[in-house]
Image (cartoon, rainbow, N blue to C red):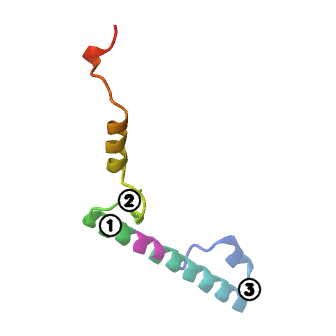
């Protein structure tokens, strides 16, 4: 990681410079590891067939599914075929 240091590290002297460079290197490694973990998690979810970490909408206990709601709406509101509508 030596060679390109941010301006803050160049302005520091002695021990402070070493500590600042070490902390910056640690933060960079941490960010890279978090990015890699996220990349691997997304890949695993895609292999499992799920793009979302959250459950699908309306699948919680006590809530009807969308298909149940649609069926009850179709039964409650009769729809005439377009051939029977006035022109």
Horizontally, residue 11 falls left or right of residue 86, namely right
Q: Secondary structure at mark 3?
A: loop
Quadrant in the picture for residue 71 = top left
Q: Residue at x 72, y 88 (%)?
A: 16
Crowd tier of the residue under label 2, counting other residues whose Cα lies within 10 Å: few below 14, some 14–19, many 20 or above: few
Q: Which residue is under mark 2? A: 56
Measure the C-alpha gap from mark 3 to mark 2.
55 Å
Nearer the observer, disc 2 or disc 1?
2
Q: Secondary structure at mark 1?
A: helix
Q: As displayed, is residue 59 above or below residue 19? A: above
Q: Along the line of sight, which residue is nearer the eye, 56 or 18?
A: 56
The label number, if any, that marks residue 87 in the structure image: none
The label number, if any, that marks residue 13 in the structure image: 3
Q: As displayed, is residue 55 above or below residue 73? A: below
Q: How many labels, in total? A: 3
Q: Earlier in the sequence, mark 1 or mark 3?
A: 3
Q: Residue at x 28, y 18 (%)?
A: 82
Q: Along the line of sight, which residue is nearer the eye, 16 or 70?
A: 70
Quadrant in the picture for residue 19 = bottom right
Residue range (magenta): 34-38
Residue at the bottom extreme, as displayed: 15
Crowd tier of the residue under label 3, counting other residues whose Cα lies within 10 Å: few below 14, some 14–19, many 20 or above: few
Q: Position of residue 25 (x, y in %)?
A: 56, 81
Q: Which residue is under mark 1? A: 45
């Amino acid at each position: 990681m030596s060679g390109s240091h941010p301006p803050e590290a160049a302005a520091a002297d002695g021990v402070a410079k070493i500590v600042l460079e070490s902390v910056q290197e640690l933060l960079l490694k941490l960010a890279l590891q978090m990015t890699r973990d996220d990349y691997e998690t997304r890949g695993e979810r895609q292999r499992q067939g799920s793009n979302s970490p959250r459950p699908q909408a309306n699948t919680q206990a006590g809530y009807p599914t969308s298909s149940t709601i649609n069926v009850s709406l179709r039964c409650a509101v009769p729809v005439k075929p377009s051939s029977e509508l006035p022109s």
